[in-house]
Image (cartoon, grey):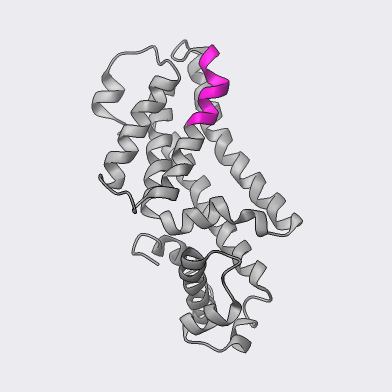
Amino acid sequence: MTAADDALARAWAKRPEGARRLFRAAVEVIGEHGYHGTSTRAVAARAGMSPAAMYMHFPTKEDLLYQISRTGHELTLELVRDAAAGADDPAERVHAIVTALVRWHAEHSTVARILQYEHASLSDVHRSEIIALRRRTEEVLREAIDDGVRTGRFDAAAVPTGELAIMSLAIDVARWYPVQRRRGPEQIARAYADLALRILNWNGGPEVLEAGPG
């Protein structure tokens, strides 16, 4: 787990030390080998614990994936809500949301790949919960876009495809970063946020593109 991925570990600060160690180990091992290529024994070994000790905190391997997915998606939702709350203008809000999303997917690329590409392995109940969290995150962006349409900042005709394109671009960063790293997370996030406004046929001055959020 990278230093940036410690954000997930901090979210577990009040959990028992053994659970935190196993959580971090699971992120590392699943990130390296994928969910189906990961065994509970490998996770326990990476954490320096016995397989029996692991079952005290996580009854199944699927539960490990669920805990990672839920924590990561809750952090993402909190992040985009905070970004949206910091901007009143719809264009600035979209810019801030996309900046936050893309930066997160770059800085936490290992975790983000698990969130985006391993959720199909969750049980039906757990997958439904994760999908609901994903939709709540998407709704934050959708509300900002809808406000932009109502105020004439965005072209309504560009919205249905544009919203999907923006979310897809943000998520996909985790797939190739940092393997194809040429720029840092902040530069990539800013470039994608600028692109998001163009995708929506933003009808405004250059102030958001020049200054960015905040």
Q: Position of residue 36 (x, y in %)?
A: 61, 66
Q: Position of residue 85 (x, y in %)?
A: 44, 35
On the image, the x and y values in percent for residue 2 come to: 36, 64
| Residue at 50% from the left image edge and 52% from the top image edge | 75
On the image, the x and y values in percent for residue 53 come to 60, 87
Relative placement, left or right, of 92 versus 57 is left
> Can the viewer see residue 186 in this picture?
yes
Residue 160 part of the magenta-drawn span: yes
Place residue 169 in its image quadrant: top left
Q: Could you tell me which quadrant the C terminus lies in?
A: top left
Our reading of the magenta stretch's main secondary structure is helix
Tell how many labels: 0
Comparing 187 with 37, the one in front is: 37
Relative placement, left or right, of 90 versus 208 is right
Query: Would you say residue 89 is visible in this rendering?
Result: no
Q: Residue at x 64, y 72 (%)?
A: 61
Q: Is residue 103 above or below residue 15?
A: above
- Quarter containing the N terminus: bottom left
Q: Nearer the viewer, residue 172 or 135?
A: 172
- At x 53%, y 80%, the residue is 42
Q: What's the residue at 36%, 59% (across, down)?
A: 4
- Residue 135 drawn in magenta: no
Is 93 on the left-hand or right-hand side of 191?
A: right
Give the quarter of the image for residue 213. top left
* Residue 77 to residue 3: above or below: above
Relative to 138, residue 79 above or below: below
113 sits left or right of 102 in the view = right
Q: Range of the magenta residues?
A: 157-165
Q: Is residue 154 above or below residue 84?
A: above
